[in-house]
Image (cartoon, helix red, strand yellow):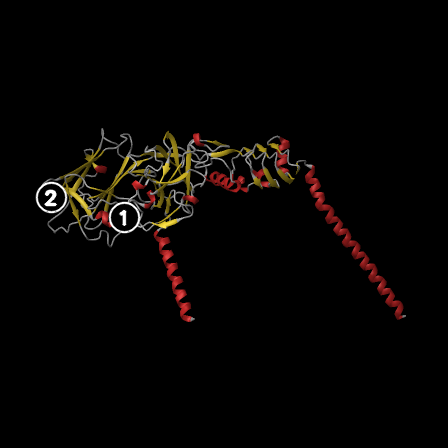
Amino acid sequence: MLKHFLFVAYLTVLLASTFLVQAQTQSGFISIDCGMPKNSTYTDKTTGLTYVSESDFIETNLGETSSISLEYLSDTLEQQFSTLRSFPQGDKNCYTLKTSNGKGNKFLVRARFLYGNYDGKMTVPRFDLYIGANKWGTVKLDNASIAATKEIIHIPISEYIFVCLVNTGHGTPFISALELRPLKNNLYTPTTAVLYRRLDVGSRSNTSIRYKDDVYDRIWQPFNFPERKVLSTSSKIDLNTRSIYEPPSNVMGTAMSPANVTSPLFSFYLSPDDPMAEYYVYMHFAELEKLQPNESRQFRIYENGEFWNGDDKPFTPKYLQTTTLSSLASVRADSSSINYDFFQYSTSTHQPILNALEVYIIQNFSEPQTHDNDVGAVLNIKSMYGVQKNWQGDPCSPKIYTWAGLDCSFSGQDSVRIISLNLSSSGLTGEIASSISDLTMIQFLDLSNNNLSGFVPEFLSELQFLKVLDLSGNNLTGSIPSDLIKKSINGSLLLSVSGNKDLCSSPSCQKIKKKKYIVPIVASIASLLALLVAFFIGWRLIIKGRKKGNK
């Protein structure tokens, strides 16, 4: 018996430890495999990450789930690409991500797409991708077999992160996977930036590197510059130190330098799709060769013919330690490209190198978002009543996608506020939702012609900007709060309550209500006094009777 108890206790601790480690290693990660069966999960064989279905992140009645054609399946295909969700109906369809510490913190958000001729039409679509109220980018696929990945560094100003697919009339939008990864707030300068390139320079394989090698699950694509030689080491990079950006050791363990050993120049260029876009560049360096005391590797870095970041000092990579150099200011293309030149310093014995490269495009999100309290309120209302409307993404912004039944107030860059909510004839049942009290700027509220029941709540009279309230055509009972009646009488509120047969809308109801409470209390007191008087009289008679008996 004791052995059995000890074995169970050991097994419990072991399982708890396993789950704890998994929770710690995947802390804050959200990994969604779109299109797979509801409430299902699996562990990815490459990353060890747990992927879940989208059932908790999107309304399951939206879109259609499909599998790619068999001819596009292979042993090397990532599992997330085998299924997808498409959206043939609606202009905008959204996923809602919410994290416990989302607001004001930095995240990497990644959406992935593989068409795979899932619909048998052999026509790749093109559509827009939004995050919150702002356009993230356009999804363009080269063909049915090549996957596309969109990645953005984003600091949400809300607890909610909405990722939306928008139909632009060029085919049905779809998505294969959606991933969210927390980042440290001191990583990457721009508040919002779209990934342009992330390169594992000098890679000796044709496979990308990500989690668990990369703690943030950044995906590093293998890349080799033409006419360069590869340097590599089997030693671990950053073994006893931790660099700020923490690129994986196996990424930093390879590098490239000029193929000609006598060449002092290492050059490359970027050819942006949009010459007006602004870019931030991050270069990662680590010395891979153990140099002798009389040897050195020093070089100056130039950007479009000028000292990069205005720094004319030669740079020296550290042996087996990562150093990241990044743009101090954004850069645009000079004519059609952004050019970088590494010049070997005059006293250096070794040529310039580059281990890894990241390039981001700055996104200036100018579209204001709906106030967080208002978003939470209408999402709760939607959930409570099961509102059958296309309520997805940001409720108000952008204006062309404002939710049906809402009107909003836009004031420059300030948060957008909901000022009108019309849920007339929407099949609502139950009591009036308490979440309405969080719509503190609301001016117009129409809940007419539904099946609402219960009392008219006091909080409606506390909505200081409310000018129109229509509760007619429901099954409300009791009396209307006195403050609402006062506002109706003085003209500050247009109140409609007709069609609620058990609801008293007269001020006299308040008096009747008081009488209903007062009369029973008075009657109770009178009854108590009568009992006391009867008791006293009876007690006196008993005393007198005893006295007569004694005589």
Foreground mark, 2 or 1? 1
Q: Give the SS element for disc 2.
A: loop
Of residues 522 and 46, the one drawn nearer to the viewer in this rendering:
46
Q: Nearer the viewer, residue 386 or 124?
A: 124
**What amino acid is found at the position of numbered circle 1 in the picture?**
Glu
Residue marked by disc 1: 246
Which of the two residues, 21 or 464, is positioned nearer the viewer here? Answer: 21
In-front residue for pair 245/196: 196
Left or right of 175? Residue 530 is right
Q: Position of residue 428 (x, y in %)?
A: 56, 38
Residue at horizontal 75%, vertical 48%? 522
Say which mark, if any, is on residue 347.
2
Whether residue 450 is visible: yes
Residue kind at label 2, given as amino acid type: Thr
Q: Quadrant of residue 545?
A: bottom right
Tell me what residue is drawn at x 22 percent, y 53 percent.
236
Q: Where residue 395 appears, x then y in whole percent? A: 46, 35
State left or right for residue 228 relative to residue 69: left
Q: Quadrant of the N terminus?
A: bottom left
Looking at the image, can residue 329 be seen? Answer: no
Q: What is the residue that sits farthest to the left in this orientation? A: 262
Q: Residues within 10 Å of mark 2 (few under 14, many from 20)?
A: few
Q: How many other residues sit within 10 Å of disc 1, few (<14), some (14-19) or many (≥20)? A: some
x, y percentage for residue 459? 57, 40
